[in-house]
Amino acid sequence: MAFAGRQGGGVIFVSIIVAYALTIMPLPEWAQPARPAWAALVLIYWCMAVPHRVGVVFAWLVGLGQDALQATLLGQHALAYALMAYLVLHLHQRIRVYPLPQQAAIVLLLLLLVHVVQAWISGLVDRPAPGLVYWLPPLVGTLLWPWVFVVMRGVRRRFSVQ
C-alpha cells in the first residue's frame, strides 16, 4: 500500500523508448531536416505532468540515451535536456494552466534553448555553424505540441500515472 501513489513508472519509460523510436524512424530525404525532437517533447510533458517523478537527472539520462542513439558528442543532448527540464520544473505550475497555444509558445522557447545549447557545444568543438534549416525542428515540434500533449495526457490518464 505504501507504493499506491507511484504507478506508471513503466509508462514513462516506454514513452521515452517510443520517442527514441520516432527519432530514428526513417523519413523521406526532404523531411529529415524537419524531424522534431521527440524525446524533448515527451520530457517536457512528463516534467509538467509529474514533476515529482521526472526531473533533471532523468532528463540528463534521457539526453545521454539520445546522444548514444544519434552518435553525437556524449553529453550534448544531456546538458540541453537537463537545462530544459530545470526550467520546466521551475515553471511547471504556471505552464500547466496556460491554454495549448500559449503552452506551444513556451515549448518553442524550450526547444530553441535545446538547439542553442547544442549549437553552442558544436561551436566549442569547431564544427561549422548550422544553417537556417537547423532551426526547423523546434518549429515543427511546436506545431506538434498540441497533439503530443493530448496523446500523452490520454496515456497518463489511461495508465493512472501519478
Image (cartoon, rainbow, N blue to C red):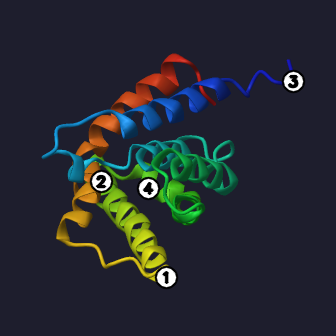
Q: Identify which residue is drawn at 21% across, 72% down.
A: 131
Question: Gap between marks 2 and 4, in whole Å?
Answer: 10 Å
Pointer 3: what residue? Answer: 2
Q: Say left or right for 104 vs 110.
A: left
- Dot 1 or dot 4, earlier in sequence: 4
Label 2 sits on residue: 104
Three-letter amino acid code at disc 3?
Ala
* Relative side of 47 to 147, left or right: right
Q: Is residue 117 visible?
A: yes
Query: Amino acid under label 4?
Result: Ile
Q: Which residue is mark 4?
A: 95
Give the x, y percent position of residue 145.
30, 45
Q: Which tag is nearer the camera, tag 1 or tag 3?
A: 1
Percent x, y of residue 24: 38, 37
Report helix, strand or loop for mark 4.
helix
Circle 1 Cα neighbour tier, 10 Å, few/some/many (<14 / 14–19 / ≥20) = few
